[in-house]
Image (tube, rainbow, N blue to C red):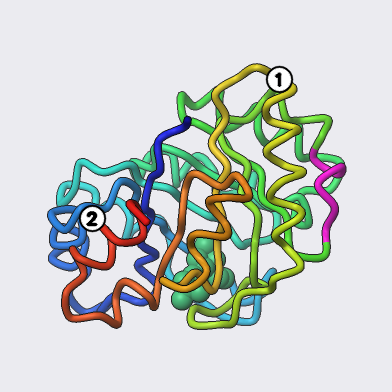
Amino acid sequence: MTKIKIAPSILSANFSRMGEEIAKITENGADFIHLDVMDGSFVRNISFGPKLIKESRPYSKAVFDAHLMIVNPWNYIPQFADAGADIITVHYEACGDKLKETLKMIKDLGVKCGAVINPNTEVDKIANVIEDIDMLLLMSVYPGFGGQKFIPEVLPKIEQARKLIESTGKDIDLEIDGGITKENVRAVKDAGANVIVAGSTVFNEPDRASVIKYLREI
Ligand code: DX5
Ligand code: ZN
């Protein structure tokens, strides 16, 4: 069985002391630091860019997992690689038929790559790149904001994506992002997800270490 990894999203952290927040959440057991980059164009929100990531990098040895919700990601990928991202994930909806070459661009910079699809995009759309990626990310909310409600219709897609991954015989992570709570985490794991993003569920709790442990072990 693939190891479960917990990826707190810093979108729900306090931005005025990000280095400290990232250091603390790492001590509390985070495996990945999920970095939600939003440009106000691909999604209706603006978050942060490579400078915040670069300056936060020394605060943690956890995997820096950059989820790019931006148009024309190829224009900025070198900056995110330089900032210290360990994995860069790009949207099928932002790349279209340039997805394969965009993933290759990430790999050529020595960084792991991931593809992500929105709740209404079929898993089949990324089947042609499954052999190229280190991680497949399924959105379980429409991207743009933390604290939204999990869309349960995504559960069968998790199962379908896990089967697709298994068909490759490769060790590809399956990440789920959006609306994960203590109540639904078991269902997403049972369906086959092994990297669990959690923003508000982790950051809104005073005892973050216990929440991370719960999400990993339940
Ligand atoms: C949504 C982001 C998510 C989000 C997760 O656009 O990609 O990573 O911040 O936050 P929660 O866990 O609060 O839904
Ligand atoms: Zn995200």
Q: In the image, is residue 124 part of the stretch drawn in magenta?
A: yes
User: Which residue occupies 38% across, 45% down?
Assistant: 5
Q: What residue is drawn where x is 50% and y is 69%?
A: 180
In magenta, the rendered stretch is 121-126
Tell me, yes or no, whether the highlighted magenta stretch contains residue 159.
no
Q: Estimate the x, y position of residue 58 in percent, counting from the top left.
A: 16, 47
Please determine whether, in this image, residue 37 is positioned above or below residue 44: above
Residue lying at the far top of the rendered structure: 169
Along the horizontal axis of the image, is 118 left or right of 172? right
Q: For the residue marked with disc 1, what is the amino acid?
A: Thr
Location of mark 1 (residue) = 168
Upstream in the sequence, badge 1 or badge 2? 2
Does dot 1 land on a helix, a strand or a loop?
helix
Residue 211's place in the image compared with 203, above or below, is: above
Secondary structure of the magenta portion, mostly?
A: helix
**Which residue corresponds to mark 2?**
55
Q: Position of residue 29 (x, y in %)?
A: 21, 52
